[in-house]
């Protein structure tokens, strides 16, 4: 109950209110700056050798559109499962979010999408372009050869892949241990490549003679047979019985052998093969020691793999080289010469030389050589620059003879021997061949440049095919261009893994699946640098109601009759998906 | 129920009991405690309101202009530099006829940087179209917030509830905090006279041409004028419910006084003691407390002061080149009286300096002993200026 109202008189209000429309007042005539929607390039997509549209993938995944997100990967990379498991994710190192709190767990998200696609048996909606007359032979069914064949098939070419082994996959099948890359994951990716129309002929080892006759059946040959021969140590005793080759050892493990390796083992080398061998030795009951000639930070192996190895009990001895091996009552006595750092090269890697006469002897049961590999046969090495040779970022085109076009890719041309670089190589080769066949050799280099993501080193098939990514600016968004006020600090997901005790007993995969709820939370962390995720800030902030929603893919446009160019939309765009430019005579709408 | 409350909390309790819907403020000493209490109430759900965090006082008041246009009860609070920064929007709030209520804690303006009591900040805003109510103690502050909402909503004008820095804002006093039911009886839900309504689209505060501007201003002037009568009726209603009454001005022992001292704010309480002591000594002295400064209650003031010989006005403020502001206003109100008393203007307590009983007594005796004022403004308690300080 309230008291009765005060009765005294109050003059009725006379104040400024108008029922006239303000539409007559075309405030657009005031404008001298003009905002515009312009999507830009995210740094992760530039760093990704496969040129994946990571910002878009995270947006789609965040909206629960897992199939579309997965298909977006497939447009640039036929190996989402493999890369989700073993990619060394250079994307995360340049993630702008890293300057805010922690980089987005992009690799874990790729794996989540691949797992989800596999579990739900998604069939990708990817149609090949109309059939072309040219036929291409691909030598080697590893990641670069399969990628080349996949992208060539998408472009409309018919491809035959020749694989020496009984099954395709190359290093993915025979080199990388199961605990990093389970077979079903690889087979799922390969089956999608086959479904796209790639023919794989296994058990055919290609010889140099094949190339001479290839011209009759094929217009080009992609050579991606990889590095399969281990380098030699060139020391006394290296050929003693029982000294093992790292790659061959890993191959035996993948074929199902499980030898007991009790006692100490030494692995010579510092690359991923050395790490894979060491971690396998742990699982076979041994005590591995990695002997490396430089420092830990100089090891070519991916740092995450090194840390996991150390965590599993692998020992590391830095700055030593083996100088001799002798057999002694069932053991090997290895003499290690100590090295010292005398400087660093231009990439920060240690330059080393022997440290006087300092040596030590270690006694081991097993020795594994893993100091790097090389091409099995010399004809597999790409030609040096010269007439008819086009050396691209990730592949080399050899058109020196009329009859046959050769393209070298994968480990044969790539400095970093990673799966995702092999994908880059296969894709670049496919695009280069398409340009070569359609427009001739002279345009290859310039046309390839046009489809590099953010003017980096890696191509995008979507940009080459003039898909929606083609319209984006190649400007690479930096952290300072992100409106970080719109983001909250949030913890990066921790990749779930088997407990160490569980890992050591088996070759089961170490990394565990990420749940959908965790994935959605993680993708929420992505800044989507330079990409519109329909957040509607422009619409909410426009003081002139000049942002108009529509049914275009952009979802909205600017009504320049009323936009007076205040730039609020551009400043309040959290992800730098707009630009503000000076009005010119061409763009001006009024006074 | 009587509680011992900090002055700032008395404001916050009143705002809570007024069921305010939107609060926006920017912290500034000595006002900060008010909004700290309120943000706690909002955070813990005691007060179901939106607390808008902003980057400046200008935005605080601007956001309330938006909120109040939507027809809800709003509150802000500021002080000194913060109020100065609000200046532009103070005009907007009154011109747009929005019943916003603000607690204004009187603090000196810089430089010299000074956080203590001084009325210049609010008095410098006297022409912005806000109703101004100056309070003496915490109970009055609490009660005045209720009165302010009733008055603001009755005449569609914003109201400042004004209190001295520290003497009021940071001092603990017993305060009777009424129950919600009682407050609801006095202050029902806000029924806006207009509001932004998407079903009835209109432009608010658009361009007004010379054809209409004067009428619009005159309408506001009338509302200001009418608010004196409105306040009287509202206060009557208030005293019926709560048993307390303040009035636009309060004469204290003025009936047979020959000299009347005029004060506002917390120095009034000190003056009451001095006046009583002087009365006990046989002096014919009275006190007039001015609470309502805008609109200025000239008629009531003329009635109270018209028949005395001398008036001593004590200003805790100074308008450079003119004088104490209460003194100016009182002089202007009195000037057409045929037998106008001598009006003495005293300046005291600037920047938080104590206005002591001794100083007030000194003012009385000076006034009594002087036939006419020795100048427009008499500065009390000035020390010798040490110019050497400039060089050190």
Image: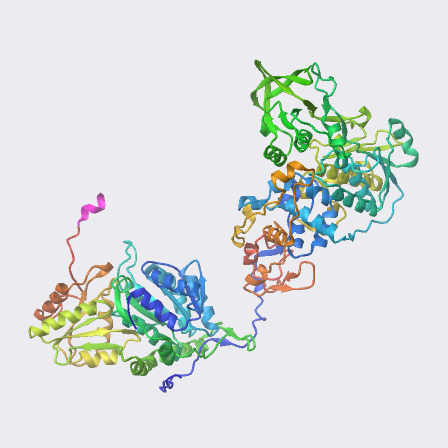
Q: Position of residue A500 (x, y in %)?
A: 61, 38
- Res. A353 visible in picture: yes
Res. B218 visible in picture: no
Q: Position of residue A305 (x, y in %)?
A: 63, 35
From this view, report whether residue A349 is shown above or below residue A158.
above
Residue A241 position by quadrant: top right
Predominant secondary structure, magenta span: helix
Which residue is farthest top? A357
Residue B172 place in picture, x, y as percent: 26, 64
Observer-nearest of B255 and A442: B255
The x and y percentages for residue A351 are 59, 22
Indicate yes or no whether the magenta region holds residue B358.
no
**Placement of the N terminus of chain A among the 4 image quadrants:** bottom left
Please state, as top left, top right, bottom left or bottom right, where the C terminus of chain A lies in the image.
bottom right
Residue at the right extreme of this rendering: A216
Residue furthest to the left: B281
Residue A73 as seen in the image, left or right of residue B60: right
**Between A460 and A496, the one nearer to me in the picture:** A496
Tell me the magenta residue range. Answer: B386-392
Identify the image quadrant of residue A569. bottom right
Give the vertical position of B94 relative to A388 (above or below): below
State the residue in front, B294 or B264.
B264
Give left or right: position of A344 versus A430.
left
């Amino acid at each position: 109950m309230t008291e009765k109202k005060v009765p005294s008189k109050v003059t009725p209000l006379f104040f400024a209110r108008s029922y006239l429309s303000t539409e007559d007042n075309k405030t657009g005539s005031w404008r001298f700056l003009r905002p515009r929607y312009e999507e830009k390039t995210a740094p992760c997509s530039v760093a990704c050798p496969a040129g994946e549209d990571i910002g878009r993938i995270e947006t789609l995944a965040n909206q629960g559109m897992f199939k579309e997100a997965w298909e977006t990967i497939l447009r640039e990379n036929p190996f989402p499962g493999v890369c989700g498991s073993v990619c060394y994710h250079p994307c995360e190192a340049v993630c702008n979010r890293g300057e805010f709190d922690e980089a987005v767990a992009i690799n874990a998200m790729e794996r989540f999408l691949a797992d989800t696609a596999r579990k739900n048996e998604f069939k990708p909606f990817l149609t090949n372009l109309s059939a072309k007359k040219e036929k291409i032979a691909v030598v080697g069914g590893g990641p670069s050869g399969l990628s080349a064949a996949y992208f060539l098939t998408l472009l409309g070419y018919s491809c035959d892949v020749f694989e020496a082994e009984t099954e395709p996959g190359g290093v993915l099948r025979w080199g990388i241990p199961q605990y990093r890359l389970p077979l079903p994951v690889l087979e799922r990716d390969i089956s999608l490549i086959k479904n796209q129309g790639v023919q794989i002929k296994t058990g055919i080892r290609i010889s140099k003679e094949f190339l001479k006759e290839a011209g009759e059946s094929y217009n080009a040959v992609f050579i991606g047979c990889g590095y399969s021969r281990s380098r030699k140590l060139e020391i006394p005793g290296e050929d003693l019985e029982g000294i093992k080759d790292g790659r061959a050892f890993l191959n035996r493990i993948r074929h199902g052998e499980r030898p007991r390796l009790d006692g100490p083992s030494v692995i010579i080398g510092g690359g991923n093969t050395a790490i894979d061998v060491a971690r396998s030795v742990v699982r076979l009951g041994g005590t591995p020691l990695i002997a490396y000639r430089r420092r830990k930070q100089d090891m070519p192996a991916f740092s995450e793999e090194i840390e996991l190895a150390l965590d599993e009990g692998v020992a590391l001895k830095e700055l030593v080289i083996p100088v001799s091996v002798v057999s002694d009552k069932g053991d090997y006595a290895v003499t290690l010469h100590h090295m010292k750092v005398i400087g660093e090269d231009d990439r920060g890697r240690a330059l080393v030389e022997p440290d006087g006469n300092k040596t030590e002897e270690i006694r081991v049961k097993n020795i594994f050589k893993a100091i790097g590999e090389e091409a099995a046969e010399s004809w597999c090495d790409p030609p040096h620059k010269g007439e008819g040779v086009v050396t691209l970022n990730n592949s080399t085109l050899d058109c020196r003879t009329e009859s046959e076009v050769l393209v070298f890719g994968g480990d044969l041309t790539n400095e970093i021997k990673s799966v995702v670089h092999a994908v880059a190589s296969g894709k670049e080769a496919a695009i280069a061949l398409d340009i070569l066949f359609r427009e001739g050799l002279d345009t290859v280099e310039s046309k390839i440049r046009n489809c590099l993501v953010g003017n980096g080193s890696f191509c995008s098939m979507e940009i080459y095919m003039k898909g929606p990514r083609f319209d984006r600016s190649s400007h690479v968004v930096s952290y300072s261009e992100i409106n970080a006020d719109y983001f909250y600090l949030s913890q990066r997901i921790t990749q779930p893994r088997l407990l160490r005790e569980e890992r050591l007993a088996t070759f089961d995969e170490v990394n565990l699946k990420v749940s959908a709820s965790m994935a959605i939370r993680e993708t929420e962390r992505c800044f989507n640098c330079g990409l519109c995720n329909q957040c509607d800030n422009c619409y909410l902030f426009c003081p002139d109601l000049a942002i108009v929603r529509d049914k275009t893919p952009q979802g909205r446009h600017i009504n320049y009759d009323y936009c007076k160019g205040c730039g609020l939309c551009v400043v309040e765009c959290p992800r730098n998906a707009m630009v503000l430019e000076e009005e010119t005579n061409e763009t001006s709408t009024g006074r | 129920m009587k509680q011992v409350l900090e002055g700032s909390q008395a404001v916050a309790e009143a705002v809570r009991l007024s069921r305010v819907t939107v609060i926006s403020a920017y912290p500034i000493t000595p006002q900060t405690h008010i909004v700290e209490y309120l943000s706690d109430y909002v955070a813990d759900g005691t007060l179901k309101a939106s607390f808008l965090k902003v980057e400046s006082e200008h935005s605080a008041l601007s956001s309330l202009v938006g909120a109040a246009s939507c027809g809800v009860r709003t509150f802000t609070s500021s002080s000194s530099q913060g109020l100065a920064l609000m200046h532009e929007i103070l005009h907007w709030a009154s011109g747009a006829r929005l019943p916003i209520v603000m607690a204004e804690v009187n603090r000196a303006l810089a430089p010299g940087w000074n956080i203590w009591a001084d009325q210049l900040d609010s008095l410098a805003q006297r022409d912005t179209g806000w109703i101004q109510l100056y309070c003496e103690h915490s109970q009055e502050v609490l009660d005045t917030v209720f009165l302010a909402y009733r008055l603001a909503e009755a005449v569609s004008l914003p109201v400042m509830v004004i209190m001295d820095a520290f003497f009021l804002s940071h001092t603990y006093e017993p305060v009777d905090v009424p129950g919600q039911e009682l407050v609801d009886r006095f202050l029902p839900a806000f029924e806006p006279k207009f509001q932004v309504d998407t079903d009835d689209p209109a432009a608010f505060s658009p361009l007004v041409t010379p054809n209409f501007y004067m009428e619009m201003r005159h309408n506001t002037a009338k509302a200001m004028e009418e608010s004196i009568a409105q306040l009287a009726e509202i206060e009557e209603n208030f005293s019926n419910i709560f048993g307390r009454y303040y009035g636009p001005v309060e004469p204290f022992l003025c009936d047979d006084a020959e000299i009347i001292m005029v004060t506002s704010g917390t120095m009034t309480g000190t003056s009451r003691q001095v006046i009583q002591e002087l009365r006990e000594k046989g002096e014919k002295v009275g006190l007039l407390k001015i609470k309502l400064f805008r609109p200025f209650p000239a008629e009531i003031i003329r009635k109270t002061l018209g028949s005395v010989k001398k008036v001593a006005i004590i200003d805790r403020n100074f308008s450079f080149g003119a004088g104490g502001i209460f003194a100016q206003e009182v002089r202007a109100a009195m000037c057409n009286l045929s037998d106008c008393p001598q009006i003495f203007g005293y300046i005291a307590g600037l920047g938080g300096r104590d206005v002591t009983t001794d100083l007030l007594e000194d003012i009385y005796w000076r006034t009594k002993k002087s036939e006419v004022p020795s100048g427009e403004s008499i500065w009390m308690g000035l020390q010798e200026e040490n110019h050497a300080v400039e060089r050190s």
